[in-house]
Image (spheres, coloured by chain):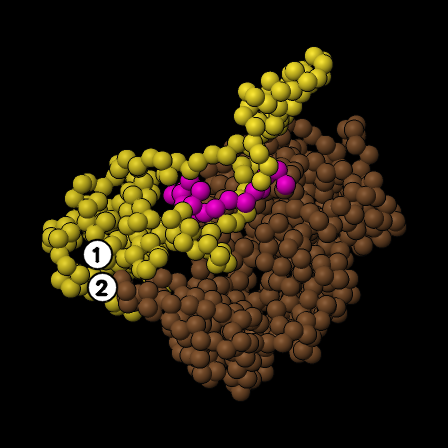
Amino acid sequence: MSERIPRRRWIKTVSTSIPVAAAAAAQQTVIQAQSPPPVPPAERPNLEVTVLDTVGDPILHFFSKDQFATLRRLADILLPADGAMPGAVATEAPEFLDFYLAQSAADRQTRYKAGLDRLSGAGFANLDAARSASLLSPLLTAWTYHPPTDEYARFLREVKEDLFRAMVNSRQFAETQGGRRGGAGMNTYWHVLD
Amino acid sequence: MASMKSDHDVLIIGSGASGGMAAYMLAKAGVKVLMLDAGPSVDWDKKRSMKAVWDLPYRGFNQPGRFPHVTQASEFDANMWIEEEKHPYSHPDDDPYYWVRIRMIGGKMNRWGRASWRLSNYEFKAKDHDGFGDNWPISLEDIAPFYKRVEPLFRVSGRNEGIPQLPDGNLIMDESRDSLCVQRFIDSAKKLGVPTTKARRATGTLASSLNLLLPDALATGNLKIVPDAIVREITTDPNTGLANGVHFVDRRNRREYNIPAKIIVLGASTLESTRLLLNSKSPRHPNGLGNSSGVLGHYLFDQIYVKNTVTAVVPEAKAGKAPRGLMGGGGYIVRFRNLKEKQAKFLRGYTYDFYSGHGPQPGQISAYGAEFYRQFRDINGACFGMTTMGEVLARKENHVRINPKLQDAWGIPALHIEHRYTDNEFNMAEDAMNMGMEMAKGAGFEILTAHKEVVPPGESIHELGTCRMGENPKTSVLNKWNQAHDVKNLFVVDGSSFVTGGAQNPTLTILSLTMRASEYMMDQKKKGNL
């Protein structure tokens, strides 16, 4: 390793040993050695930006406090975290559904609220998994092409599928899927044509 | 005729499969062509970029309510598709019609599945075979030379099987080996007398008029393409009744224009072409242009789709234990019903696409929590699926007409669409489900789910008919050259000209019919008949 000369002593050394004109150039060299020359600014730079939901907590609009607590509990039971894979709660799927349902069709909004109210009325948020099983038993019936005619059973099917989609389409989920093909959910996006 | 700013011989409306092929043929033969398209010219490099699903505004769910009838639209490509707010249409409340549209240079070819099957004489001469409906005025022998030329243009790959209901093609031979699960399925089908083949598909990531037809046509110097031109009406000469121009609107600012034309080629897509003709009324054509028969708008049909009719599981592939070569790939089941035998419950036939190596939909697993994950992982990558495509009978009562109370954002009267499936289609779907399960079980697969539910009319995006061809001007709009019986300088070359459609994807036939019509047009022009 070469010996490091203190900056002040180094400048003094060169300023007393070379002519003035050369000293100015040498001083510039010293400055450059300490900080690399600035890159000329791009005319239209692509700035690195941060996604909103990594810095802010979503404000809830649609569900009541009880309904949302029930939805979170439901999310944790239907799609819990599993090893390194975050579950529906850690991926903020319930928070996303609060946003999404606020814009959805009225019949879907009604079904969601009624379904959560039914669960909430049964004390679902405080039940353990074993005791909640009877409330979730419609999810164990065989798949049919058409949704169930019973609105509560239909709600359960919808909320399970919605939570699953919101979970696997989340940033948090993508981060755990790193080397897996398609795990990051990248695709070609079409911008507005006009 | 009004003064011509443009020196075109032929005016083409639409830039998709049919409009693009007409431009390609005519411009290369030295004909001066002007093409109008209702959509924008899109710079694909500037208008597309890679994004993560979690960075989309709706996390991949799509904006609620934006596309009530376009199930194909994802949040990634939502901006490609036509929104009903500006482009409305109506249908009976209890019979929804899913009209799926794209407006841009290249049309729906920018998103088609590229499946490229020939029709056979079971379709062209369907009435001769089972007595229902009408024959086409042409046979396979008339169009085969054009199929033979179109297939290499679109680099269609596949395999020839030498079976009459799926005529052989001029293909890039697909000699790839089938995976073991696909071989087992093919063997099971064969035991039941069901023929299979490789998918037959235009190759390349994009096989559109945008990249395969229009660039060559432009290179001749004989083609001008005008985007953003929404044609409101085809005008006619009051003395001769011939088409003499079009009236169009600038999509962006609603400014209106006229342009004269000597010959018009209409390829705006099945229902848009018919809508334009119905909106082009005049004293000589009081019921719409070319509609002395009263048939214009009638005989609408498409193909039934039963998505994922059967989802099965290959047992040896469970728990991620599939040996190399077991899973992956797929193929196509060729029509096998009502060829020599006769089904009691339905006419005509159906086909399937089959595919393997995927996972289940979350709704297909009747569990939650840890058990859901266990079952999901157990069969992820072990699934085998089939989707049914079936022929829909062309019935006069299935029709479109102008809705006088509804206009689009440019003030152009919109369509009312009435299309209902019948027991013929529903019984066909049930048979397809049962046969699909039998074939899957015969291959040793376990059935996960099976159903017979047909998607709503229109959703297949294979809408056909409404401006059909025929020998008799009293029962058809076009002659066998796609030329209007009533208006000899008008050619309608898209899917509206179909008489039957079979279960085969229609684009290859649209391209081939247009190539044939274009050569006839040039011949007639040369002879002074146009």
Checking the image for residue B406, the label placed there is: none
> Which corner quadrant holds the N terminus of chain A?
top right
The chain that appears brown in the image is B
Tag 1's secondary structure? Answer: helix
Q: Position of residue B167 (x, y in %)?
A: 69, 73
Mark 2 closeness class: few <14, some 14–19, many ≥20 residues within 10 Å: some
Q: Position of residue B421 (x, y in %)?
A: 45, 62
Q: Which residue is mark 1?
A: A152
Q: Determine the residue positioned at 79% across, 30% down.
A: B4
Q: Quadrant of residue B195?
A: bottom right
Q: B54 or B293, which lies in front? A: B54
- Check residue B60 for magenta coloring: yes
The chain that appears yellow in the image is A
Q: Determine the residue positioned at 86% across, 45% down.
A: B30
Share a chain, discs 1 and 2?
A: yes
- Check residue A187 for magenta coloring: no
Q: Which residue is mark 2?
A: A138
Q: Residue furthest bottom?
A: B191
Q: Determine the residue positioned at 54% across, 25% down.
A: A6
Bounds of the magenta segment: B45-67
Q: A106 or B177, which lies in front? A: B177
The amino acid at mark 1 is Tyr
Q: Position of residue A156 (x, y in %)?
A: 25, 57
Q: Residue furthest left?
A: A122
Q: Earlier in the sequence, mark 1 or mark 2?
A: 2
Mark 1 closeness class: few <14, some 14–19, many ≥20 residues within 10 Å: many
Q: Quadrant of residue B505?
A: bottom right
State the count of labels: 2
Q: Is residue A175 visible?
A: yes
